[in-house]
Image: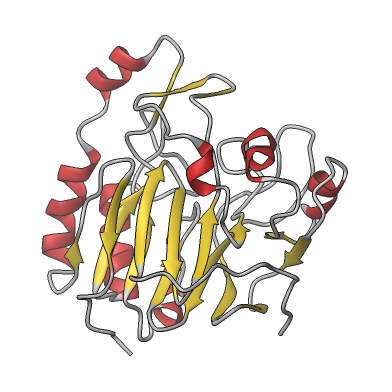
Amino acid sequence: MRNPATRFSAQHPAAHLTWVGHSTVLLGLDGVRLLTDPVLRNQVGHLRRKVPVASATEYADVDAVLVSHLHFDHLDPPSLERLGRRVPLVVPRGGGGLLSRRGFRVVVEVEAGEEIQLGALTVRATHARHNGSRLPFGAKAPALGYAVTGSRRIYFAGDTDLFDGMKEIGQGLDIALVPIWGWGPSAGSGHLDPRRAAEALRLLRPLLAVPIHWGTYAPLGLGRLQSALVADPVTAFRRHAAKLAPEVEVHVLDPGETLRLDAITSGG
């Protein structure tokens, strides 16, 4: 177990998570602030954000960043630069060179099954069923999820399809941050659509699920067409979850909305 050099925040008054949008989640737990897959720009490549992102200064004091994979809508170097080049970055093995060459000072590569210690939190890299390389000709690295354990146990799935190991990840799980869609009219291979995300809940059995990776970005010029082609993924996810995992509470956040974790009874 490794402990990268970090500058851990002062104890925060309450455990909380904020869905920034897409796959970006700010997690404050046991005095540590983690940010997942930071995409903090209103336009990334051919994707335009539907709801403007808050100023990146709100996230500038995070203690570490967890990157699930190298796709452009999950690993965005200009967004990371807004956080500063000294913030520790945890990335899948094979993706570190891409960031080191851009001047980031603390880059820790991990693989599925490996654990690191971030202050009071243990972060375990988990398998993800997804092609995580930076296509078409960029760095190659597997996709990962992360299980964060402290006073609460939280699973950030990144991008993934269903896999049997979700049962093991779900043991004693309080919160699952589950991707339920994407930015196009089809989630495609290696993703969870609303029904398969509900099937993931049946494997994970968390106390609470927060859907992410939906409703944030749309291709330039296709926003209206996308709305016409794609049914509301949250409504579909709620419906399937009620049938497949009725014991799991589903809590939907809007981009920028915060959920306090104090009242959640631990599943451990």
Give me the residue at 55% from left, 49% from top: 37
Given residues 26 and 226, the one toward you in this image is 26
**Residue 110's spot in the image, x, y percent?**
72, 68
Image: 104 above or below 32: above
**Residue 225's spot in the image, x, y percent?**
30, 14
From the image, which quarter does the N terminus lie in? bottom right
Q: How is the image coloured?
A: secondary structure
Q: From this viewpoint, which residue is outermost toward the bottom?
A: 268
**Residue 112's spot in the image, x, y percent?**
64, 72
Give me the residue at 73% from left, 54% from top: 141
Q: Choose top left, top right, bottom left or bottom right for residue 234.
A: top left
Image: 11 above or below 237: below
For this view, does 192 lie left or right of residue 149? left
For this view, does 260 lie left or right of residue 39? left
Give me the residue at 59% from left, 55% from top: 68
Q: From this viewpoint, which residue is outermost toward the top?
A: 221
Q: Choose top left, top right, bottom left or bottom right for residue 46.
A: top right
Image: 182 above or below 221: below
**Residue 174's spot in the image, x, y percent?**
32, 77
For this view, does 152 lie left or right of residue 120? left
Given residues 37 and 135, the one toward you in this image is 37
Given residues 159 and 189, the one toward you in this image is 159
User: How many numbered marks are there?
Assistant: 0
For this view, does 244 lie left or right of residue 45? left
From the image, which quarter does the C terminus lie in? bottom left
